[in-house]
């Protein structure tokens, strides 16, 4: 590294130390965010170092992040994207590729999912002309069960896409078995659950593809960003093509003839020898991320284990602190799982003597941030009312979630003092409303 660059980065370190917040916690005044990025000196240095090098497009750091992340999550391939939503769009769109021949999904085919979750788990189904089939979730795990998914399988069912709700794994081994038995694709939306395990195996390693988000609320951040992971090389190739404008060629930008056949292809009705770099085999997108994002991803990835430990520790502290609290349904880890939690989800018992709004207002007034379980029942939102879909059984629990549920934070930026203030505040509210 040049001396001048070293000097700049030393200044960045000093800047970081001088501007670091005091860390003093004042109950009722200090904001307790439900989620947020935890960024340290190394993250700041990595961002500035990437800027100094002016690596502004996807390149060396992106490729390094992809291979490191794939290794960490035990998949053969990772493709970095500009968001978790883009990752879901790519994963579902990949299932419609002509390269899958008879297995490709066609308009009108059905994909099983849940209504109580994040919209962009479901949107790619509709965006590809497919039909979402909604099943209800259980309260306390907030996931669909294998039994409910099995009941939803019909003659046009071709795939399942489910998120591990707020980090809590769904019954992924059983659902993967159902997928195998019925020749369905399974996509695990792992955006909220990096590091969770089910039967001792990492979530994201059971299905055909898995997706991750690097938005600041998530386990790792790049500001914005996401990833599609798979060990199926045919699917990986399709994802890459769709992400990179739909091109057929897999040379990196700046790379020219990796396959040694750049001017030797004949595809479509193009003249023989047309430059493979400009042959398009999919109607694609450009959903790439940049090296500046990837540089931050790499320093964040080095801290992933400690982030996961902190999330588990924080969740346990809240769970133990609130155990037995009257009027609240507290979350349960799915049997057989060890969740890497995203949030601590609470449902106000419909029989309770108080309303969710009263408890949420009380907490927000004390600067304890709350969030809803994303959309609640998605089918009740204006955007979805007229969209084609099928509901199997009813969505009674999804409705309860819409009306009674919220979550509070467990992210690594929270301290024991904050967590204890969260539990004591909830208990104070409950004592006043018993
Ligand atoms: C389960 C789930 N899937 C997908 C996404 C979308 O990720 P992004 O915000 O990176 O687009 C989110 C966002 O929080 C999410 O919680």
Image (tube, rainbow, N blue to C red):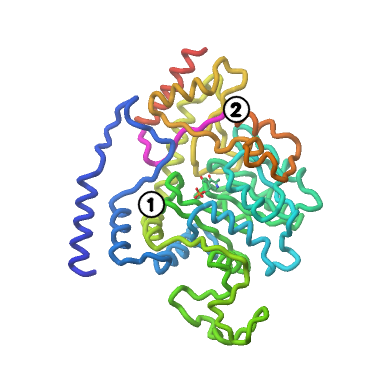
Dot 2 corresponds to which residue?
A: 403
Task: Return the x and y of residue 249 as percentages of the image width and height.
Answer: 55, 75
Task: Return the x and y of residue 276 as percentages of the image width and height.
Answer: 56, 80
- What's the magenta region? 403-416
Counting residues from the start of the chain, the first of labels 1 and 2 encountered is: 1
In-front residue for pair 208/247: 247
Residue at the image point whose x is 43% and y is 64% from the top: 62
Res 152 label? none
Dot 1 corresponds to which residue?
A: 303
Up the image or down, 73 lies above or below 36; here it is below
In the rendered view, does 133 fall on the left or right side of 354? right
Up the image or down, 148 lies above or below 302; here it is above
Local crowd size for mark 1, using a 10 Å CA cut-off: few (<14), some (14–19), many (≥20): few
Residue at the image point whose x is 24% and y is 69% from the top: 1
Q: Tell me the distance, in whole angstroms, between the alpha carbons under discs 1 and 2.
A: 37 Å
Q: Residue furthest right?
A: 155
């Amino acid at each position: 590294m040049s001396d001048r660059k070293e000097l700049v980065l030393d200044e960045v370190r000093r800047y970081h130390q001088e501007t670091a917040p005091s860390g003093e916690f004042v109950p009722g005044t200090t904001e307790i965010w439900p989620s947020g990025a935890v960024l340290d000196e190394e993250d700041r240095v990595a961002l500035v170092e990437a800027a100094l090098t002016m690596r502004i497009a996807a390149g060396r750091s992106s490729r390094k992040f992809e291979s490191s992340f794939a290794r960490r999550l035990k998949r053969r391939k990772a493709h970095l994207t500009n968001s978790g939503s883009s990752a879901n769009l790519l994963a579902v769109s990949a299932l419609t590729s002509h390269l899958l021949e008879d297995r490709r999904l066609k308009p009108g085919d059905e994909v099983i999912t849940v209504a109580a979750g994040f919209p962009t788990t479901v949107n790619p189904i509709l965006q590809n002309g497919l039909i979402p089939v909604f099943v209800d979730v259980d309260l306390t795990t907030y996931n669909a069960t294998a039994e409910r998914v099995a009941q939803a399988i019909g003659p046009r069912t071709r795939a399942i896409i489910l998120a591990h709700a707020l980090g809590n794994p769904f019954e992924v081994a059983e659902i993967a078995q159902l997928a195998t038995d019925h020749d369905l694709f399974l996509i695990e939306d792992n955006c909220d659950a990096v590091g969770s395990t089910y039967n001792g195996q990492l979530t994201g390693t059971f299905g055909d593809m898995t997706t991750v988000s690097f938005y600041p609320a998530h386990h790792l951040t790049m500001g914005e960003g996401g990833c599609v992971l798979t060990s199926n090389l045919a699917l990986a190739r399709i994802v890459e093509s769709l992400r990179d404008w739909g091109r057929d060629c897999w040379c990196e930008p700046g790379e020219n003839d990796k396959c040694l056949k750049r001017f030797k292809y004949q595809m479509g009705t193009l003249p023989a020898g047309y430059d493979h770099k400009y042959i398009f085999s999919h109607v694609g997108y450009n959903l790439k991320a940049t090296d500046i994002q990837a540089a931050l991803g790499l320093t964040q990835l080095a801290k992933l284990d400690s982030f996961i430990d902190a999330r588990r520790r924080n969740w346990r502290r809240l769970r133990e602190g609130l155990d037995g609290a009257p009027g609240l349904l507290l979350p349960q880890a799915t049997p057989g799982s060890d969740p890497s939690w995203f949030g601590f989800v609470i449902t106000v018992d419909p029989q309770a003597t108080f309303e969710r709004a009263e408890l949420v207002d009380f907490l927000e007034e004390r600067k304890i941030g709350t969030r809803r379980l994303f959309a609640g029942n998605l089918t009740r939102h204006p955007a979805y009312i007229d969209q084609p879909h099928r509901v199997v059984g009813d969505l009674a629990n999804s409705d309860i979630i819409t009306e009674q549920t919220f979550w509070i934070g467990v992210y690594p930026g929270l301290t024991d003092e904050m967590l204890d203030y969260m539990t004591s505040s909830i208990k104070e509210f409950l004592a006043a409303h018993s």
